[in-house]
Image (cartoon, grey):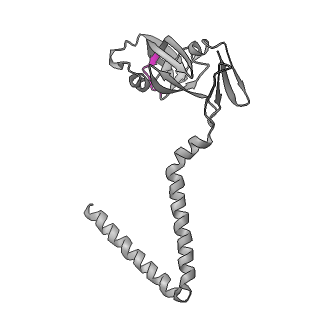
Amino acid sequence: MSGDDTASLIYLVVLLVAIASWVFLQNRLSLGKVVQHLAIWVFLFVGVIAVYGLWGDIRQTVRPQQMVIEDQRQVVVPQSPDGHYYLTLKVNGQPLQAMVDTGASDLVLSMEDAARIGIDTDRLRFLGRASTANGEVRTARVTLDSVALGATVDDGVSAVVNQGDQYRTLLGMSYLRRWSGFEIRDRQLILTR
């Protein structure tokens, strides 16, 4: 702890003692009520901290997740709050979240996701070009060993790695065409094999 941190801590402790002493002297006749109110405020404060710390887990539990319906060979994906549809795939054995993008021609990997699934991005040759909303970007064609969505596994899937700034993998038409149909109904994307 640095000298500035120690001084700040001493200041806060002295301030807390002064405020607590004032509250005690002002309310010494009804001390039980003061302790009761203090306990309520402490519980509220701890509750807010707990909800804030666990918000990610709570949100994952409350938010609908993608479902795989094996007997009908369907995958049902709820619309996310931002209006998009996100699928969790296993690409080359690694979990990968991709955003469904019917405007993308290919399955388009970001540089980070490509590296995460085992592609050596330093050895890629970015010979292709693609037009995006942010302008033209360079791409490198790759072949993925496997792409699994639920029980459906496709081997030898063609994809491209985007050399530009892209924060998420896009699941484009080249992959969606592998399914016999897809539709959007009741704020859900339904893929059928």
Q: Is residue 142 magenta?
A: no
Relative vertical location of residue 99 with respect to residue 42 in this rendering, above or below: above
Which picture quadrant has residue 119? Answer: top left
Relative vertical location of residue 93 with respect to residue 17 in this rendering, above or below: above
Which picture quadrant has residue 172? Answer: top right
Q: Residue at x 57, y 15 (%)?
A: 175
Which picture quadrant has residue 151? Answer: top right
Q: How many marks?
A: 0
Q: Residue 110: x, y in percent?
A: 45, 24
Q: Quadrant of the C terminus?
A: top right
Residue nearest the viewer, comparing 36 with 116: 36
Residue furthest toward the right? 186
Q: Is residue 95 left or right of residue 80?
A: left
Q: Is residue 5 left or right of residue 69?
A: left
Q: Residue 14: x, y in percent?
A: 37, 76
Q: Residue at x 53, y 78 (%)?
A: 35
Q: Quadrant of the N terminus?
A: bottom left
Q: Residue at x 51, y 88 (%)?
A: 28
Q: Residue 7: x, y in percent?
A: 30, 68
Q: Residue 181: x, y in percent?
A: 68, 15
Residue nearest the viewer, comparing 172 with 139: 172
Residue nearest the viewer, comparing 7 with 176: 176
Residue furthest toward the bottom? 29
Residue furthest toward the front? 71
Segment tinted magenta in the rendering:
160-166
Q: Residue at x 51, y 49 (%)?
A: 54
Residue furthest toward the left? 3
